[in-house]
Amino acid sequence: MRPRLQLIVISILIANSFLFVFATTSFADELLLREAEMALELRDYSVAVRIYKELSAQNNAVAQVNLAILYEQGNGLKRNFKAAFSLYKKATDSGYAPGINAFGVVYERGRGVRRNYKEALKLYEAAEKKGNLAAITNIGNLYEQGLGVKRDYKKAFSQYRKAADQNYTPAQYAIGFMYEQGLGVKQDFQLAIGWYESAAIQNNTTAQNILGFMYREGYGVPKNNITSVKWYKKAAGLGNAAGQNALANMYLNGFGVGQNYANAERWYRKAARQNQINAQYNLGYMYEKGLGRDKDLKEAIQWYEKAAALNQASAQFRLGKIFEAGIGVKQNSKKAANYYRLAALRGHSEAQYAIGRLTEQGKGVKRNRKEAFNWYKKAATQGHVLGQTNLGVMYELGLGVKQNFVQAYMWYTLSANQKLTKATLHRKQLAKRMTPAQIKRSEKLASNWNVNTEKLTQERQQLIVSN
């Protein structure tokens, strides 16, 4: 199953809130709100904050909601969830539907208040009665995820459909996902594509990215890199960081467009400046490998460190390799082990193997064969060939685990199936010490074994650059 993007319409996005201005404000207030909107477009947060504070003091619900959003984001003023909570409550008490929905989001997210899904649902339902499409969609999300209610895909689909039929793009995207995955409805990729396109042509960048991904991977549709690039360009042009990173990947690899390192770097940089962690990693990779430019390890490390600080596993792994080998930096096994461990905890199989190796050797970390065994096993179950071989060795010799020839032979077999000569030799030697019955049992285990790859995250989907 392709992983679910975060759908929850936590928003009143600032721009969207102005859809309600004319029904709720005086003409003079409308002008001020438009001035604030223009200031936000120019990132002049001080002007927007001043206007919203002035109007909020006059109990203007639109201004209260937008000021609350700025408090949550920390734009133009210090981030303050309690202040945001107070403003959302005021807007809710005035009966302003977008404010009621936003207040529900506060409870769902647990910002400025203890998380409470039931209270969130209550508020969403109140906003739904006023026709708020974001609230209708958010109710669907609660039922889809089973948050505060029993998971009910049919109920979720019904909610999404209410909003989607009124041309609400987040709900159209959600309907597309339900059809794609067959949740609450019969799986239908054509209908999924149709709903995604309905949202995408209205500039829903999430839907644009999904379409780009589906056409790039041939997921539910014939593979078409040119169409993939088309959708990624739309999302990237609208400032979507994930779309910018994905478009850069296409330029880097020459998929659906002529290979162009300069364009790849330009789009990676745009995304990286928005803290898109895969773009930060990919930009670092270009500097490290000298793709389209001279190698610059110092610059590469800086980008890797930015991504690693935001828990990008591949960046953490690369830093581990750099410090272990002492490439352009002073060799430091302890730092290497720390970075490998961080990536390993996020499911990175190469990092799991690497920290297992350092732990077995006692380099940069205290020697612990039992812990090394556990890391090798994590890597091996994801199909890491050296992890499988080392796991076989530990089973054969009884290092960190009780000796078990059947398990050792099985792991050697799995590794040998990936054409690792060393594993083939280990298996051949071990077979001399085993009975035919043991070998037969091992071979059966190996034939029934399936790689236990963890569900791909959107991060890994978006990342094309090999690590």
Image (spheres, rainbow, N blue to C red):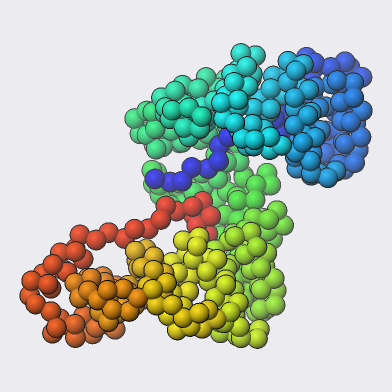
| Number of numbered markers | 0
Q: Nearer the viewer, residue 363 or 188?
A: 363
The structure residue drawn at horizontal position 68% and vertical position 28%, both measured from the top left corner, is 102
Query: In the image, is residue 457 above or below residue 403?
Result: above
Tell me: residue 147, above or below residue 98. below
Q: In this orientation, does residue 220 appear?
A: yes
- Image quadrant where one finds the N terminus: top left
Q: Residue at x 43, y 30 (%)?
A: 151
Q: Position of residue 426 (x, y in %)?
A: 24, 83
Residue 321 x, y percent position in the rendering: 55, 78
Between residue 82 and residue 324, name the one nearer to us: 82
Locate residue 208: give its quadrant. Answer: top right
Q: Residue 225: give x, y in percent of width and height.
A: 48, 53
Q: Position of residue 180 (x, y in %)?
A: 41, 37
Residue at horizontal 51 percent and vertical 83 percent from the top: 363
Residue 280 visible in the shown view: no
